[in-house]
Amino acid sequence: MPFNSNPADVIEKHMLKRGCRTWGLVIYRCTYKSDADWEEFMSRLLYQVRSPLEEYYDGLDILDSFRPTVMDDPTRFDGATPDAIREHFNEWAPAACESEQGILPTDVGHRCIARYGLCIMVDEEALRSVLAIPREDLDGSNRTGFVILVHRRHLEARASIDESDEKIEDDDCEPLYGCTWEDVGWMKVCYDQAQLYTCAHMNQSYQWEMEYRRPPEIGLYC
């Protein structure tokens, strides 16, 4: 994980370079057992965006453009798989990039914006892992609370590899939702890194490859 003293500066530079007006990963709610638990989860997730920014000069300024859009539809997302979430995200992202940022889907620049390349998925296991953290430990080191990060262009990248002569090692792994590939296109990541870190440091496909950890391992430890 690359180190940078001020994620707000990095995100702001990305926004200026790409001509973006907003930032933040879309969040898919995939569990509906308790609205109160969901509200507490969201409170903790957003706290892990605001709290680190308070440490930096003018760090909170970037919150004005933070848009943690929540996809909330129990008829479509309750119990959904990562593949189903990716399918919806692929439908949403191109038009959203144009309407939110004024960047056409045909513009190669939209491929270098984390908001339209990655999304956060929260199932019951992920939600429980975050709520299990004692409140007094929320500012401490986190090794157990996670969310699921879904790579929008995983199948596209895989198809490109399959068409090449590149040999893929370790593609006979334990099945995850039936997939035996080493890179299944999603991973568990520390929830406290899921917004700030990804938007600052995971805007390119090669950065996914650098950070990827096959589940059940949890990635993006700070």
Image (cartoon, helix red, strand yellow):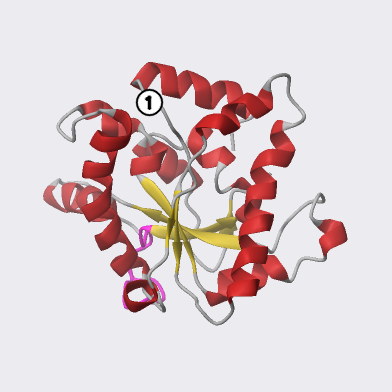
Q: Indicate the quadrant containing the C terminus: top left, top right, bottom left or bottom right.
A: top right
Q: Residue furthest left?
A: 163
Q: Position of residue 121 (x, y in %)?
A: 46, 62
Q: Nearer the viewer, residue 172 or 100?
A: 100
Q: Position of residue 220 (x, y in %)?
A: 59, 48
Q: Nearer the viewer, residue 189 or 137?
A: 137
Q: Position of residue 71 (x, y in %)?
A: 40, 60
Q: Across the whole image, how many numbered discs are drawn on residues?
A: 1
Element under disc 1: loop
Q: Residue at image x 18%, y 35%?
A: 105
Judged left or right of residue 156, residue 207 is right
Q: Is residue 177 magenta?
A: yes
Judged left or right of residue 220, residue 52 is right
Question: How would you rate the neighbour count of disc 1 (Cα within 10 Å): few for under 14, some for 14-19, many for 20 or more?
Answer: some
Q: Residue at image x 67%, y 29%?
A: 60
Residue named by callout 1: 20
Q: Residue furthest bottom?
A: 33
Q: Residue at image x 75%, y 31%?
A: 54
Reply above or below: 175 against 217: below
Q: Which residues are magenta?
A: 171-185
Dominant SS in magenta: loop
Q: Indicate the quadrant containing the N terminus: top left, top right, bottom left or bottom right.
A: top right
Q: Residue furthest right?
A: 136
Q: Is residue 12 magenta?
A: no
Q: Residue at image x 63%, y 54%?
A: 45
Looking at the image, can residue 69 be seen?
Answer: yes
